[in-house]
Amino acid sequence: MIVAGLVLTGIGALIHVYIFVLESLLWTTDRARATFGTDRAEAEQTRTLAFNQGFYNLFLAVAVLLGTVVFATGARGVGATLVFTGAGSMVAAGLVLLLSDPSKRRPASIQLGPPLLGVLALAVGLAA
């Protein structure tokens, strides 16, 4: 279960790296605008906000990925803490999205699904 938990939280981290790229690097492109449902003017007006928000997503991904590496090198407590913190924050952010705009069910599920399953699997694996 520990490996499954780390793989699932790692998938969550990769999703958040992708979100970082869209928000911080590609925000005004056709692809990012289609993904987030913005028009060109709105994307230009919110560019700075999206840039900042993208880095939040990157930092969560870094916490999970660093935690996985630290866990694998033998510092299980520190590694698990980093993974739980990063992935738990991903889950919380997905819940905020879902509760603030129920029409965003799909993106919220993508954002919170793998990290939630990973946190649960890791917790079960560590408890065994």
Image (cartoon, rainbow, N blue to C red):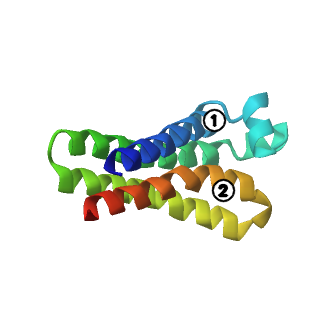
Q: Amino acid at mark 2?
A: Ala
Q: Residue furthest front?
A: 128
The front one of 124 and 84 is 124
Q: Amino acid at mark 1?
A: Leu
Which residue: 44% across, 47% down? 9
Q: Which mark is residue 103?
A: none
Q: Which mark is residue 22?
A: 1
Q: Is residue 112 above or below residue 25?
A: below
Residue 112 picture location, percent across and down: 57, 56
Total labels: the figure holds 2
Which residue: 49% across, 41% down? 11
Q: CA distance from mark 1 to mark 2?
A: 16 Å
Label 2 CA crowd tier, 10 Å (few <14, some 14–19, many 20+): many
Label 1 CA crowd tier, 10 Å (few <14, some 14–19, many 20+): many
Relative to residue 90, is residue 123 drawn left or right?
left
The residue that mark 2 highlights is 108
Q: Quadrant of residue 100?
A: bottom right
